[in-house]
Amino acid sequence: MIGFDQGNTDPELLVDDHTFAVRGVDEAVDFVTFAYHYRSGARRPYVSTLVGPSGRNVLECTPADHAHHLGLWWGHGDVNGVDFYLEHERVDMLHGRIEHVAFDEVVDDAPWFGFDESLEWRGPDGEVMLTERRIALLHLADDNWYTLDLDSTFSASTDLTFGDTKESVMPGIRVAEPLVTYAGGVMTNSEGGVGENACMGKPARWIDRSGHRRGLWHKEYTEGVAFFDHPENPNAPATWFARDYGPLSPMPGHHFLGGGTLAADESLRFRHRILVHRGDVNDGDVAGHYARWLE
C-alpha cells in the first residue's frame, strides 16, 4: 500500500465517535493513511491526512498563517450574510457551523473505503440553511498512486444568497510545505500552465502540485497531489484559485459560481477527484489518470 515500505501493512478502517480513518496494521498500527474528522472542535468536518509515497502527509493541517485551512475542507464565507468559512469569530458577520448528521452508508472493502454522509449547514441560531449529501470514496489502488473521489450535493432549505467572496472552498486543499512553489515545488495545470501566474484565475480541467521531500526511513521522494474538476460541474472547466503558498480550489466552488442565489429546495452538485501519486506531473501520468476518470 502507498506510503508503506515495510512489510505487510494492509489497510483497515477505524471509525470512532469523531474520526473516520484508514490506517495500517501489523508493523504500523498507528500509521494513518486517511483521516476525516467529522466531529471535532472545528466549525466543519475536514480531511486532515492523505499520506504520500514518502509516508508523510501531502496536506497542511493546520498552518499557522490560516487557521481555517483544514487540509481538505468545505466552506463558504457568505450565505445569507452568515460566515461558514473562517474558524475564528469575526466582528462583521455572524458565524455558522457545518455539522455531521449521520453516515448513511460506510464502505469497508479494502482497497475501497468511504462513506455517504448527511450534513447540515446551520446558522447562528441553529436554523438549517443548507443540507448536504457528501460522498467520499478512497481507492488505495497501487503502491504508486491512489484516489479520493468527492461528490457533494447542496440543497437549500430556504431561499439563499451567496456572496461573491473569495472566502469559499467547495472543496479546497492546502498542500504540504514541501510541495509549495517557494519550497521548490511545481504547480502545473492541464493546459500547460506552470506557476501561480499561469494557474491562478485560469480555466483548467485539473491542477497538480508536486515536489521533492525526505520521507520516513531517510529516503528521498518526489510526490504530488492533483485536483480534478469534473466536466459536468457547474461552469466547467473550473477557473482556479491557486496560490504559490499552498491553497488550491476550483473557483466554481471557491466563488460558488461568482455569487448568486439558490431557491428553497433547489440543489447544486459538484464532483472532484484527488489523486495522490509518486513522481512529478509527468512521471505520475496525471493527464492519463484524468482521462481514465472520465471513462
Image (cartoon, helix red, strand yellow):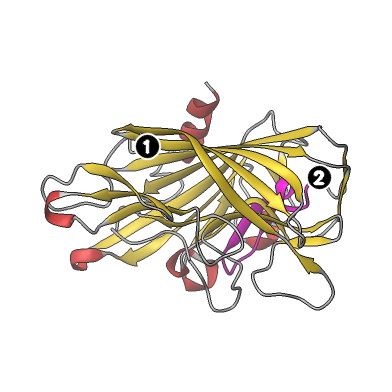
Q: Which residues are magenta?
A: 240-256
Query: Callout 2: 10 Å neighbours few (<14), some, many (20+)?
Result: some
Query: Callout 1: 10 Å neighbours few (<14), some, many (20+)?
Result: many
Type of amino acid under label 1: Phe
Q: Is residue 39 above or below residue 250?
A: below
Q: Is residue 211 above or below residue 13?
A: below
Q: In the drawing, does residue 259 fall left or right of residue 115?
A: right
Residue 261 visible in rendering: yes
Is 245 part of what is drawn in magenta? yes
Is 17 part of what is drawn in magenta? no
Q: In the drawing, does residue 133 fall left or right of residue 36?
A: right
Q: In the drawing, does residue 184 fall left or right of residue 168?
A: left
Q: Position of residue 38 (x, y in %)?
A: 50, 53
Q: Position of residue 191 (x, y in %)?
A: 64, 42
In the image, which disc is placed on residue 61? none
Q: Nearer the viewer, mark 1 or mark 2?
A: 1
Q: Position of residue 160 (x, y in %)?
A: 86, 46
173, 54: nearer the viewer? 173
Type of amino acid under label 2: Leu
In the image, which disc is placed on residue 113? 1
In the image, which disc is placed on residue 257? 2
Q: Is residue 87 above or below residue 74?
A: below
Q: In the drawing, does residue 5 fall left or right of residue 15?
A: left
Q: Name the quadrant containing residue 68.
A: bottom right
Residue at x 18%, y 65% (from the top left corner): 217
Q: Position of residue 228 (x, y in %)?
A: 57, 40
